[in-house]
Image: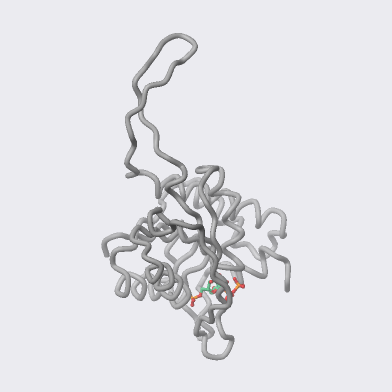
Amino acid sequence: MNNIYELDHPLIEHKLAILRDKNTGTKEFRELIGEIATLLCYEAMRDVKLKSCEIETPITKMKTHKFDENDYAFIPILRAGLGMLDGVKNVIPNAKIGHIGMYRDEETFEPVNYFFKVPKDIEKKTVFLLDPMLATGGSAIDAIDLLKEKGVKNIRFLCIISAPEGIKAVSEKHPDVPIYTAHIDKKLNENKYIVPGLGDAGDRIFGTK
Ligand code: PRP
Ligand code: URA
């Protein structure tokens, strides 16, 4: 499939091994989600267009390149996406931030949208949509639908763990949205949890169970 970028690096495998471990506590879990999000965002910025500029170092003037941080927005899908926010802010500190509230109905597994607030001029920005887990793909598809309804044209989806089922669903519905993932796992189980996965990301980030 085009447009799917899986981080393939020993550092990621090491961090994922600790993250997935059921004995890893809340503090370390949160830190690792942030660290992996930083690395995902770094990878998702690889083809960014830079603009020429001239600066002056303490030694001399030089021509170089920059991008405008205001052209970017981070949008976590609540709750679990919030866990990635500090990590991506390390990469683009001045990016604007929106929020999409979404939860999966425990019986139907269908996503339910309960909150939507995005920065002004969102349609002019490149949006990094954040959610640690891409399972059936329902939440990501609905969040991308909502952003496209607002006129957003350039969306990148960043997730820590993804299932093949979710990748297929998102890339069929939104082939223009690249997916950056730290790892593609084996499958979903009968409760639509990712196997081997890491359990419930929101509960592990917020310590709610
Ligand atoms: C989790 C996860 C995604 C969604 C993925 O959220 O953070 O948003 O499930 O599943 P899907 O691909 O099948 O839609 P959850 O509904 O548990 O809400 P939470 O973030 O509030 O814990
Ligand atoms: N949401 C999670 O938090 N974990 C999964 O494995 C699937 C959906």
Instruction: Name the residue nearer the viewer: 51 or 92.
Output: 51
Residue 21 x %, y %: 63, 62
User: Which of the 4 image quarters holds residue 138?
Assistant: bottom left
Instruction: Name the residue nearer the viewer: 75 or 82.
Output: 75
Residue 117 x %, y %: 55, 66
Residue drawn at x 56%, y 63% as measured from the top left: 81
Instruction: Name the residue nearer the viewer: 30 or 16.
Output: 30
Residue drawn at x 51%, y 43% as measured from the top left: 91
User: Which of the 4 image quarters holds residue 42?
Assistant: top left
Residue drawn at x 50%, y 73% as measured from the top left: 195
When the figure is inspected, residue 131 is found, relative to residue 96, above or below; the finding is below
Q: How is the image coloured?
A: one colour
Q: Report the number of numbered marks.
A: 0
**Residue located farthest toward the front when viewing the structure as drawn:** 120
**Residue located farthest toward the bottom when viewing the structure as drawn:** 107
**Residue located farthest toward the top when viewing the structure as drawn:** 59
In screen coordinates, is 131 left or right of 209?
A: left
In screen coordinates, is 23 left or right of 94?
A: right
When the figure is inspected, residue 196 is found, relative to residue 53, above or below; the finding is below
Residue 206 x %, y %: 70, 65
**Residue located farthest toward the left when viewing the structure as drawn:** 2
Instruction: Name the residue nearer the viewer: 86 or 116.
Output: 116
For the N terminus, the image quarter is bottom left
Residue drawn at x 39%, y 76% as measured from the top left: 165
Residue 157 x %, y %: 42, 61
For the C terminus, the image quarter is bottom right
- Ligand 2's quadrant is bottom right
